[in-house]
Image (spheres, rainbow, N blue to C red):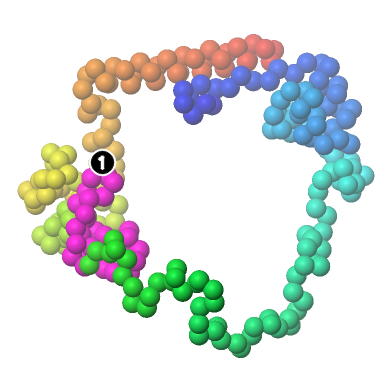
Amino acid sequence: MTKSKGILKPRHNWTDEQIAILQSRYANERTALLAAEIGCGLHVIYKMATKLQLKKSEEFLQSADSGRIKNLTSIGAQYRFPKGHQPANKGKKMPGFAPGRMAETQYAKGNVPPNYLPLGSERYSKEGYLQRKMTDTGYPPKDWVPVHWLLWIQHNGPIPSGHRVCFKDRNKKNIVIENLELLSVAEMMKRNSRHNYPAEINEVIYARASLTRHINKRLKNERTENDK
C-alpha cells in the first residue's frame, strides 16, 4: 500500500515458466538473483517458495555463494584486544596543557552558552505552547513545562495519567483557568475527529476515503480473478 494515496501495489502474477525456474534453481541459488531475473521483490520469492515448500539445500547453505556468516565469533577476532589487555595510557593523567591550538577552541571553565536561559524563563514551543523553565537538568523536555499545565496543577492538582489539559476555545494564548479543561485521550480523539471540521472539508475527507475503498476493492477483485 502506498503511503501517499493508500492504494495497494499491483500483485505479481506468476507464469508457469517463472514457477519452473523457481522450482529448479531456488535450492542452490541466491534468492536476490532469482528475484532480479524474475522481476519481483524478495518477499514475493519467499512467499511462493513457502507455498511450493521449497528450501535451500544444505550444500548451498554451507557454501561461500550463500553469503551467510557461518561463525560470528571469528569475524574480526584478529583486530580485537585479547583478554586481560592493558591500555598503554592506563593510570596516566591527561597533560595539564592543551597541545597545538587546542586551547583556542576549548570552553573556559564555568563557561555559559550565549543562548542559556535561567530558571523561570519563558518561551514558545514549535507547537505554539507557552513554556516555562522549571528545572535546569539540560534536558529540555523535562526542564520546560507548558504554562497551562502549571496553571491547571495550581488550581486542580496533578494531571491524571491518560489525560490532557486542553483549551476550550482552542486558542493556545488564552491561558486562563476558565479556558482550560481536562480531557481523556479518547475524548480528545472525538473532539479532533473529522466531524468537527466545516461541512466542505468533511465532504472532501469522506470522498477521498470512499474513492480509496473503491480502488482497493476493485484491485482485490482483479487479483482474485487472476488467481482462478
Tell me which segment is drawn in magenta: 119-145
User: Where is residue 147 shown, x and y percent of the image?
Assistant: 17, 56
Q: Quadrant of the N terminus?
A: top right
**Please, which residue is most extreme toward the front here?**
100
Local packing at callout 1 (Cα closer than 10 Å; few below 14, some 14-19, many 20+) is: some
Tell me if residue 141 is in the magenta stretch: yes
Instruction: Give above or below for 98 relative to 223.
Output: below
Q: How far across and how far down the image is residue 33, in percent? A: 80, 32
Tell whether 177 sits left or right of 211.
left
In the image, 46 versus 107, the foreground residue is: 107
Write down the quadrant of residue 110 in the picture.
Answer: bottom left
Up/down of 30 relative to 101, above or below: above
Q: Quadrant of residue 185?
A: top left
Magenta includes 38? no
Of 156 and 69, nearer the camera is 69
Inspect the image, locate mark 1, and give the three-letter code of the amino acid beneath it.
Met
Residue carrying label 1: 188
Q: Residue visible at 21% across and 67% down?
A: 119
